[in-house]
Image: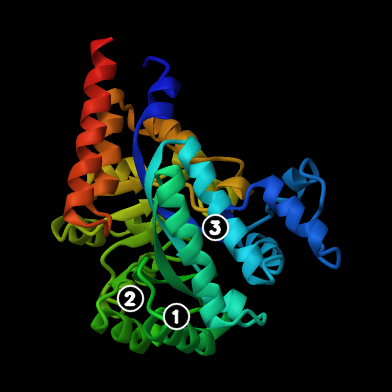
Amino acid sequence: MTDLQPFVAGLPKAELHVHHVGSASPRIVSALASRHPDSAVPTDPEALADYFTFRDFAHFVEVYLSVVDLIRDPQDVRLLTYEIARDMARQNIRYAELTVTPFSSTSRGIPDAAFIEAIEDARTAAEAELGVVLRWCFDIPGEAGLRAAEETARIALRQRCEGLVSFGLGGPEKGVARPQFKPYFDQAIEAGLHSVPHAGETTGPQTIWDALNELRAERIGHGTSATQDPRLLDHLAEHRIPLEVCPTSNIATRAVADLDRHPVREMVAAGVIVTINSDDPPMFGTDLNTEYEVAARLLELDERGLADLAKNAVDVSFLDPAGKAKLAAEIDAYTADWLRR
């Protein structure tokens, strides 16, 4: 294989599984920690590398929530959101569906309307100034239970903002059954939102079946354990239900032992649509460009293969048809120009 890093760096991309607070760069995290000195989060950007070394998924959640606690007012929210878009623009990410957890902020005292105003102001500025189109997935933090589900649904449906396209479920899977959240997903779907829960990252295939059957999932966040159930793989392939795969994240949280054993090869071999994503990139020492390079190695892809992977994300995104056509054409034009060199 040739060195694909330069090609990936310029490739126009969409990202469908990336978390709002989890995308805070070390520079932003350290600045927020300096503003809130009562936090346990280090203020030294270099110390954050050690802080973001996780023993297991439970430890990751603990660290993640400590960073969430740094987002305490609308100014923090707006700054974080815009700076995420700036980092995306540097990677030639043209479109992203950012997983946002309103409950984490509103439960800490930020009013619903102020939270929405902050992310929407950042969204419109990012599109106008950086050329990055952002859309929101409002997700339930599963560890906070049904109170969080009710609050998330209420904010999503009553404060309905222009950028909101989907409804999700994140956080720990063990001990957090998917079916209990069915009423809230039903409300969101009836209101026109798409269903995109996490499932099967640190639990078995039954969690994915529950997400499909109870939450009417249109895409599955992670879905790492899908390869343990051939019938499930067949179902995902037949019904064209994509998996949002985040390779480095799965290693960092110990959901997968190492990259060479990552199940993405089996997913693709079974005919399942996969998209490549970064999840919580600074926390895992990665970015979307790096994840595409990892995918190229795992799937033995050349430039055309990577372009097809990028178009997968566009195709199964919730971008409007005209936006999809424009971005897919941009990927094709870039790839054709590259291969003529």
Dot 2 amino acid type:
Asp
Q: Which residue is mark 2?
A: 210
Dot 3 amino acid type:
Thr
Q: CA distance from mark 2 to mark 1?
A: 8 Å
| Label 2 vs label 3, nearer the camera | 3
Q: CA distance from mark 2 to mark 3?
A: 32 Å
Element under disc 1 = loop
Dot 1 amino acid type:
Ala
Quadrant housing residue 198:
bottom left
* Residue 174 seen in render: no
What residue do we see at 67% from left, 67% from top?
Answer: 71
Sequence-wise, the earlier of marks 3 and 1 is: 3
Q: CA distance from mark 3 to mark 1?
A: 30 Å
Are the residues flagged by discs 2 and 3 in contact, CB closer than 8 Å?
A: no
Element under disc 2 = helix
Q: Is residue 136 left or right of residue 209?
A: right
Q: Quadrant of the N terminus?
A: top left
- Residue 192, compared with residue 228, is above or below; it is below
- Residue 233, compared with residue 336, is above or below; it is below
- For residue 177, the mark is 1
What residue do we see at 82% from left, 57% from top?
Answer: 34
Q: Position of residue 315 (x, y in %)?
A: 21, 49
Q: Which residue is mark 3?
A: 81
